[in-house]
Image: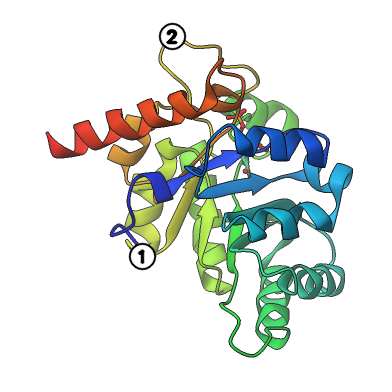
Amino acid sequence: MNNLSIRDRIIVALDVPTEKEALDLVARFEGELRFVKVGMELFYGAGYPIIEKLQKLGIKIFLDLKLHDIPNTVGRAAAQLTKMGVEMFNVHVAGGIQMMEEARNQIEKNLAVGQKRPLLIGVTQLTSTDEKILHEQIGIPYSMEAIVTHYAKLAKKAGLDGVVSSPLDVPKIKGACGIDFLTVTPGIRFLNGDHHDQKRITTPEQAFQFGSDYIVVGRMITEAKEPAKQLEEIVRNVEKQILN
Ligand SMILES: O=C(O)c1cc(=O)[nH]c(=O)n1[C@@H]1O[C@H](COP(=O)(O)O)[C@@H](O)[C@H]1O
């Protein structure tokens, strides 16, 4: 995993509502974008055609629809997403082992000849959630660390390739599930930047130090005056830190 370059490990979240806005944003990177996230807003707004168009540009796609339903429904949805040929997609670990296993089985069953298997990633606890929300609203009485580690172990048991978590959770997850169990980490911010709705955050440099395999970066790049320059700066700073 870690033989990928830093640039290949940065997933830019295309959180815009239309195909035009997504393609205009992508064009601003002049071919330097390797991996993007298509989430609910863009997929519900633009549908499958945006997936095809991004694939034609040679860009890898994390399709972030966070499936969470009964096992049969999630399995059937996973079958459809597999046919889209994306690099990775996700389900909520909170749906349970049977639901995750059904998704995994349907991926295997629906692969076209020669198709690379999409990575199946489980969402642990959203990075917009802190321990206070976990305890007082969601009703989970455990520490964030305990519940995220527990969810990561469940995901591994169900045969998933990795989990979405805060970079802060990565050392525990790797300790519990092994170094090869992938961690995809949003909640990335500059130290003095706007945190928006994110609660459990780190800088890009810290995320890679903690051992994240991929970081997911949205507004910090997409709302910058010059998104391509912002991406370059992140890549440069992380590489500099790794060399030191
Ligand atoms: O699954 C995700 O990608 C995800 C999980 C999570 O716990 N937190 C989280 O922020 N995300 C996504 O990561 C992106 C983060 O965007 P920014 O906060 O703008 O960097 C958004 O598209 C979220 O939907």
In this view, 64 is above or below 15? below
| 161 left or right of 232 in image | right
Q: Residue at x 43, y 9 (%)?
A: 192
Position of the N terminus, as image quadrant, is bottom left
Image coordinates for residue 98, horizontal then vertical, percent: 71, 73
**Label at residue 33:** none
Front disc: 2 or 1: 2
Please give the residue where the numbered disc 2 appears in the rendered image.
Answer: 192
Q: Is mark 2 within 8 Å of ligand 1?
A: no
Q: Is mark 1 within 8 Å of ligand 1?
A: no
> Given the current orientation, which residue lies at the most extreme top position?
192
Position of the C terminus, as image quadrant, is top left
Query: Looking at the image, can residue 143 be seen?
Result: no
Please give the residue where the numbered disc 1 appears in the rendered image.
Answer: 180
The residue closer to the viewer here, 139 or 104, is 104
Residue 75 lies in quadrant: bottom right
| 32 left or right of 154 in image | left
Residue 177 lies in quadrant: bottom left
Image coordinates for residue 165, horizontal then vertical, percent: 52, 44
Classify mark 1: helix, strand or loop.
Answer: loop
Q: Residue at x 53, y 37 (%)?
A: 186
Instruction: Name the residue type under label 1.
Output: Asp
Q: Residue at x 76, y 33 (%)?
A: 21
In this view, 94 is above or below 227? below
Instruction: Name the residue type under label 2.
Output: Asn
Query: Looking at the image, can residue 86 be seen?
Result: yes
In this view, 91 is above or below 7? below
